Every structure is written in structure tokens, then in C-alpha cells.
Amino acid sequence: METLKPKSSINERSKKFAKTFQKVIGLRTATKFAANNGICLLATQARCKEDGFTGQNQKKNEDNDRARNRAVVEALIARLFAGVTAIKAAYAELQVAQNPYNNEAIQAADQAIVDELRAISELKRAFLKKQLDLSPQVTLILAEIQEQQSIMKTYEITIKKLEADVDHKELDIASLKNQLQECLAFNKSLEKKLNSSGALSMFENIRFSALNPTHFVQFLHHTIRSIRSFVKLMTREMESAHWDLETAIKFIHPDAVFAKPSHKILAFESFVCIAMFEGFNYPNFVIPSEPFENNQPHRHSPMLYFEKFKKLNSLNPKQCITQNPNSSFAKFLKFKYLQLVHAKMECSLFRNLNQRKLVNAGGFPDSAFFVAFAEMAKRVWALHSLAYSFDEEVTVFQVKKNTRFSEVYMECVAEDSVFLSGEASAADEVDLRVGFTVVPGFKIGQTVIQSQVYLSPVGSTASC
């Protein structure tokens, strides 16, 4: 017969069993979780390592693709630029082929342009459809070669065009040189006619009753041309003798101001005119060897002066001297030469005084210098005879320096002066006055023939 145990003992045993089971269950669960967690960790680490290698490869592939795409784009751009350069070269060929016209060259250049445009169009189509199939390295090299060839072709065309332009310009220059030579020859012939000792056609058949001041003005211009011709010859001789022309100009007109260097010759023209027209207002030109009473006005009738003028105008100076060595003109010629051409000047220009000695002896030197001087002197003497043919009082006048310009009594001899052309600043308000008289003025009775003056700004002291 079993002994019944109390309920408290059963409850204690149950609690103890439950604790033991709970410990076993907890240990197994912990072990399982630990095992499972370890496997997950290893698997995760393995997967991470595998994903890391895959990401690096993917990044590398992306970099390679990006680099390839960049290389393809660069090659495409290089090919496009090469195509544009080829089109430019073909267009240049097309232009050159049009003049002179070359049908074959025009067709070839046109076809080259069309082919290149078609190739560029194909590249555009392939690029838009992402079907570019080209090797970047090969394409770059070929594009560089094509571009250099096109550039060389353009250079060759440009060189040929420039050579053609040079040939054309040379032909133009040769033609202009021929025209210049013809003009110079024509001008020389005109100058020879104007400076010749023969009579002017307008005075060959002139009658005394038809004489008027206009004839004097016309012959005055004829005389001034001869003076300027002599002045040019004289300055050339001075330059050949290494004269300091600037010093000579300052000696003639110390304070003269010139707008242009070419105007400086006017100072020498003024010097010659002063010497040649000195005494013009006296009937016999104030020749020292002539008695003073012969210089009284109206000693001879106007008709005699007119006949003297016509006779002298029809002869050359040498004929005048040869026919009448003791004539008033011969004395005038000798006096004016010795007055104008100083002994030191003649010695400097010609290294001797042979001309001076011959002139003093009544001879006529054959040098170009003296022939030009004699022609000038003859015209001045003839102008004097013409002036006294009017039976009016003859007056010669110079304009004083710094005198205000007057159109009644003066004419500006240098119309191309910057002082007059407005090239000087308007703000300067240049006050132009007479710098010096180049050609004197004349008054025959009540008729005034303007003097020719050179204008300069007031207060200027330096020559331009």
C-alpha cells in the first residue's frame, strides 16, 4: 500500500523540473541562435566580398566605356573639322577655277564639296542613331592627315592667287610706267615749247591797237614759268654741290614758316624775282651803265616799246646778244647775271669762274645753267617792254611781311597749304599773314595785277 505524499512535495518537484527544462531549452536555443548567427555572418561577409569585387569591375568597365566614348567623340569632332577644312579647300578651288573659267576644275571642286557634305551627313545620321563604328585612333590620324592636306591645298591655291595678283600688278606697274614716261615726255615737250625762245603764238599776230592788260597777265605767267624752271635748275645745282639749303633759306627769309617741305623752293623763287624785277618800274630797268636821264618815264613812245617787245619775243637770247652785243638787253643780261649769281656761288657750283669771265667779256656761255638764265632774263626784259607799251605809269610792289591777306592785291601761291586746307585744327584759330612775297605785283595805270604771296601763321618762328 503506497504512502500518499503531500501536494507540496509534488509542486516542488514540478517547479524543479520546469526550471531544469527551461535551462535545457534555453541552452539549446542559445546554441542554435549562436550557430545560426555565425553562419549568417560568414555568409554576409562572403557576399560583401563578392559584391566588392563586382563593384570594382563595374566601375572599371564604366570608366573604360566613358573613356572610349570620349575618344569616339573627339575622333568625330576631328573628322568634322577635317571635313570642314576640306570643304573650304574645295570651295577655294571652285573660286579659282571660275576666273579664268575652267569647266573641269569647277566640276571636280563641286564634286569634292558634295562628297564631303555627304560624308558629314552620314556621320550625323550614325551619331544620332548611336551606330558610330569607328576606331578613335585611326580616325584621329586620318582626320589629321586630311586636315593637313586640305590646309596645304588651300595654301597652294592662295599662293597661286597671290602670284597671279603679283603678275597682274606687275603688268599694271609696267603699264603705268609707260604712261608715266609718255606723260613725262609730253610734259617735257610742252615745257620745251613753253620755255623755248620762240614767240608765243598768242603774241605773233597781236596788233598794238588790240593791246590790253590781259596780254600782260598772260605774258607774266609765261615769264614766271621760265623763272621757276631756272630756280629748279639752280637748286639742283646747289644740291649737287652739297649746299645746306636750309641755311640758304634762312638767309633769304629768316623767319619763314612753311606748311610743307615742297614749299621751301618758293624762298629761292622769291630771291630770284627780287633780283630780276628790281628797277622794273623805270623805263630802262635802271642799268647802272645807262645815264640817269635815260630812266625818266616816257622817253620812248609806247609804240617803240611794243616793237621792241615783238622783236625780242621772236629771237632767242643768243641771237639778241650776237646781233647787237651793245644793246640794252645785252647790258641788262650781264648786269643781272653778275648781280644774281655771286662769284662765290658760281665757284661753288661750277668749280671755276669761267662763265663769269665770259659774261664780263660780252660772251654767251653755252652751259645749261646760263642758257636757262638768259631765257628767263629775256622774258623779264620783254615783259618790261610790254608793260611800257600801254602808255601808262608802271609800278611794281612788294607786300610787307605780316600784312593781312587781300584778294585785291594778293594771290596765294600755295593753295595746297595745310594752313588753308583746313587740316589744321579749327580750335587753333590760325591767323594767316603774308610770310613773304614770291612774285611782285604790278600796277599799270589803274589796273592792278596781283602779287603772289606765301601765307604763314602769325607768331611762328620755326620752319616746318
Image: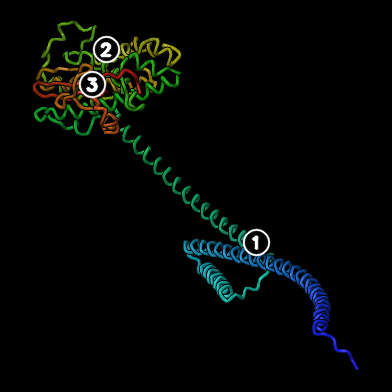
Observer-side mark, 1 or 3, equals 1
Query: Could you tell me how far apart the alpha carbons at marks 2 and 3 are, in whole angstroms?
Result: 34 Å
From this viewpoint, which residue is outermost toward the right?
1
Residue 302: % across, % down: 11, 20
Observer-side mark, 2 or 1, equals 1
Foreground residue among 439 and 90: 90
Q: Mark 1 points at which residue?
A: 145
SS at circle 3: strand
Residue found 32% across the figure and 20% down from its top: 268
When the figure is inspected, residue 167 is found, relative to residue 422, above or below; the finding is below
When the figure is inspected, residue 117 is found, relative to residue 316, above or below; the finding is below
Q: Name the residue under label 2.
A: 331
Q: Which amino acid does label 2 sit on?
A: Lys
Residue 315: % across, % down: 26, 25
Query: Could you tell me how far apart the alpha carbons at marks 2 and 1 are, in whole angstroms?
Result: 90 Å
Residue 331: % across, % down: 26, 12
Dot 3, crowdedness within 10 Å: few (<14), some or many (≥20)? many
Rendering quarter of residue 146:
bottom right
Say how many tags the image has: 3
Q: What residue type is labelled 3?
A: Val
Rendering quarter of residue 133:
bottom right
Image-based side of 416 in relation to 279, left or right: right
Rendering quarter of residue 419:
top left
